[in-house]
Structure formats: structure tokens, C-alpha cells
Amino acid sequence: MKRIYLHPLPVRIWHWIHAACIVLLVLSGIQIRYADHIHFMSLKDAVNFHNIIGIIVSIDFLLWFGYYVFTGKIKTYFPTAEEILHGAIRQIRYYGYGIFKGEPNPFHPTPDNKFNPLQKGAYMTIMLVLLPLQIVTGIILLDVEKWSYIVDFLGGIKVVDAIHVLLFFFFASFIIAHFYLATLGHTPLAHFKAMITGWEEEPEEHH
Amino acid sequence: MRWGLLKILVVLCLGLALCAFEVGTVWAVSNEDCLECHGDPDFSTELPNGKVRSLYVNPDRFKASVHGVNEVSCTDCHADLSELDYDKDVPHKVPAAPVSCGDCHDEEQSAYESSVHASFRKQGKKTAPYCFNCHDYHYTKHLEALTVEERADKFCLKCHDPMKIHAWLPEKKLHFKHVGCSVCHAPETGGEVALRLYDVAKGEFLSGEKLLKVLKVDYDNFAKHFDKDGDGKFSADELSQLVKVLRKNKIHAVVRGEFVVKYDPSLHAIVKDKAVKDCDACHSANSSFMQKVYLVVSKKDGTAAKYPVDNKALSSIYVSDFYAINANRVPWLDIIGVLIVLGGVAFAGGHGTLRLLTIPLRRKDK
């Protein structure tokens, strides 16, 4: 068993702040959208809570983004042409077939290249497109009047809300899928441990 | 000679009769009589404290007012000034008695008497408003055509700064733009949702005049023009059709909603401490406000035509600039959302189940 220091401390802190915030945002989001049916907390409290958590995660995201751009680590998220053309298919074949037969994972993470091609595609879309879009629509909804010219341009508050809500459903779904995919380490808890200690255990290859 | 005497007698008698008639009869004071002086822009008086107070009434603005349009005369309200004596410097008594609006507007008056405004006035607070402080003295206009913001500007915001006194309320500016003050401060009146077309390119509400000119219809035929199913109400599709037709005519309008109270005398019973602070009053599909919905088309005279709208249309994406969280969710967004979440569950559950079922396979390989 090989041990690799895959997740440095700041990354782990970011990950868990993001995780906690996104879970809380989804839960309070459910309360806000379905206040007629769910009475865990008042609409007003849910909105205020949702706003505070939203601001925390937005600042947290900006710090993360700045750090990743500044250090060049953002490249970790960009798949190469080879990865798009072949790596992704290799990885799909592994998750859809090989994994059930006990084949080894064709991808071996290193501290500089820790995502497989599918992870790169997914996380790049999430961290650089969907999460920013969710933050932007969230900031607009935080003070609709201030951003009324953008709201008008987009065609009304319901359009902005629809984008925010669809992404909210996506993130709710993502939490479930992400949690499940995290059990695909060499043991079901391996990836969870790695995201706490930073050290990922990688089975040695036997050729 | 006799004839001459007779002539003189006849003239004298007629003169006496005329004099008697003049003394015994009070000439009705016409608006023109009043405006002879009060129609002069410089007509003013000096108050005991030295300040100059204008006594001018703009004839044109008065004629355009609700009272002017309805041919209410000056002395209908200033009933104590029904006689003019031109021998005096001021031909009527000064100061004139306060006007009693309640003589005609009795329901409004009795609602006002139970308001926080009246109670402060009774306590001697001189800043507490009476009718004319909000409605103006001589230029009272119809209000139906005004938007929530315009109405607030003309009335409540003259004295109140809502940003300072609603610490508990989230999204203050948004609420003040879409919820009339009296919705929460005259809770007994009951209300409705007023939909209006907002020109996003121009940044202003589309006037009824312009709307109908573009559509080449009049107020009577406007609703019928779009009411394809003939149910007498605008449905979501019919509203979207309206927006599309406007777009073809290069007007980029969205349907914007406002919570307003009914035009009822009871809205004068403004409350302070008993004002609605319950979000559910509006933010619920069961809200009484969400049950009655109208498309409001302004008229030049300050009134407005109100066309009924099917309240299900509020949940349509086409009513795109009105969303009271939770109350008028777009249903298909929820359906898509459930499918997205179920997709995540199905993926995790399906893949996980296959992993469990294939455990023997991996053991055999080892």
C-alpha cells in the first residue's frame, strides 16, 4: 500500500467548509421553497440563515479560487486532449464495468494530478461554472433591487430564481452522488479518511 | 303730464322691487367668483407669524382633479362661504371653517377615525395627518393607475421613511417596491395581486394608452382580444401571448406583480402596532392575496381598467417578474428538480447495488 499526501490542509479545510455550507444551503433552501409544507423553521429565519451561509460559502469560494489561480493549481482541473479522447472512456469503462470485476483503477493520482479525467470534467464544470453561477444568482437574489438592471435584462425575478433553483436541485443531487462516489476507494472509507488526514492510500500495482 | 308721472311711478316701483329682491336673495357663489381672487398666482396672505401663505388655486389643476371632474363647487366643501360681501375687504369670513370631507366621504371618515393617524391627532400631535395632508387640498386625483411605488411616494413617504422603521423585514427595498404599505398597515381591507406590464428596455411601466395604441384595441376589447378560451380571465398562455405580441411590436415587457389592497374606504384605518408581520400572509399559496389577480391597465385620468387573471397564472414562468417565495412556485421546476435528485439517488443506488451483487465475482478473481 502506497501513501500519497493528496489533500494539503488548506484544501481539506476548504472542502469541509464547502461541504457543510452546501448541505446547510440545500436544507434551508428546501425550507424556503416549500415553506407551506415544511415547518422546521420560519420562512424569515430560513431566509436569513440561507443568506448568511451563502455569503460564507461565496467568500470561501473566492479565497479558494484566488489561491488556485495564483498558485497555478487550477490546472489540476483542466483535462488534456488525451484525457478527453481516451482517458474519459477508459474511466467510464472502469466505473461501468471493470470496478465490478475488481480490475485496478486505470488512474493513479499524484499530488499534482489528483483527478481522473471524469473528475476533472465534473469538478471543472462544478467549480468554475455551476458554483459561480449559483453564487452570482444567489447574490442577485440577496438584494434584488440593487441588481434590478440584471434581473430586468434576464427577463424577471422568476428567471433568476429558476436558475438558482435548478442549480439547487443539481447540488442536492451532487451531494448524494459525491457521497456515494467517495465510497469507491480501495475500501469504502478510504477516500473519507484521506479528506480528513490528507493521506490517500493507493494499492500497489501488481503486474 | 299724467302719463309722465305714471312712467316715473312705474320706474320707481320696479326699482324698489328690484332692491327688495336683491336684499332678500343670496346669489349662489360660483367657482368663477372664487377664482376671481384665488385664481391669481400671486394671491396670498400674511400670517400672524410673518410668513406668507399662498391662497392660489390653480384652476386647470382643480378642473383635472377628481372634484373638478365631478363638478364639485368650491362652496360644496367650503360650505361656510356661501355668501360673498363685496363691500368688505375680504368678501367672506376669515378664516374659513375647516372642510369636512366626511360629509360626503362618511365611510372613509369613520375608517380614518379608527386609524393610528386619527388617534395621534386626538392626542394633539399636530404632525398626524388629516385627509388633505395625504390627498392634497384642491388637486385630489384618482389613484388606481399608480403603482405601489408611486402611491407610496405620493402618500406615506411624505412623512415616513420605511427603510428606518422595518428592521425586522428582509429585502426591504424589494418589499416596498412590490407590496403596498396598506397591505400590512390596513390588514382588515383585504387585497389582491395587481399585474402590470413593465417595459424592461425603457425601465418604466407601460401606460395603458401606449399599450392599447400598439395593440390597436380599446379598453373594452383589450381582454376579449386575448381571451381565446372565452372564460373572461387571462390565463398564463394568454398573458404570454400578450407579451409575445408586444415583443413583435418591439416592446420588451415583462409581467410584474404587486400586492395591493382593494380600493375600499376601510383602507383608511391605518394601523401601526397591529400591522401584519407574518410572512405567511403573502408567502403562501393559500394567501388570500393570491386568490384575486388582475391585470391593471392605466387610464389617462388616473383610473385604471382591471382585467381578471386566472390565479394559476401566477405560478407560470410567463409572470416572470413576480415571485413571492413559496407562494407561486413554478410547478415544472419542481418536477425537473425531483428528477435531478432522483437521478443522483438512482445512480448511487444502482451502482451500489451492482457493487454488492458483484462481490462474489471479485472474490473469485482474488
Image: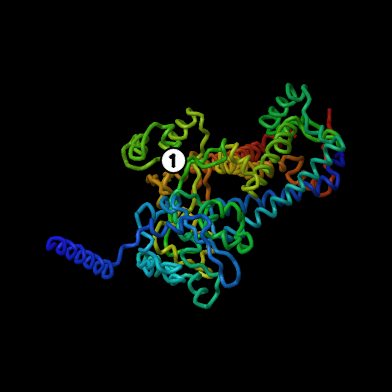
In the current view of this chain or complex, which residue is farthest to the front? B1
Picture coordinates of residue B348, whole percent (x, y): 63, 40
Image quadrant where one finds the N terminus of chain A: top right
Picture coordinates of residue A56, whole percent (x, y): 74, 51
- Residue annotated with mark 1: B208
Picture coordinates of residue B338, whole percent (x, y): 54, 43
Q: Nearer the viewer, residue B363 or B109?
A: B109
**Residue B325 seen in this snapshot:** no
Residue name at image x 87 percent, y 37 percent: A71
Image color mode: rainbow
Q: Is residue B89 above or below residue A147?
A: below
Residue name at image x 74 percent, y 31 percent: A103
Q: Nearer the viewer, residue A155 or A182?
A: A155
Q: Is residue A186 left or right of residue A27?
A: right
Q: Nearer the viewer, residue B239 or A53?
A: B239
Q: Is residue B11 left or right of residue B76?
A: left
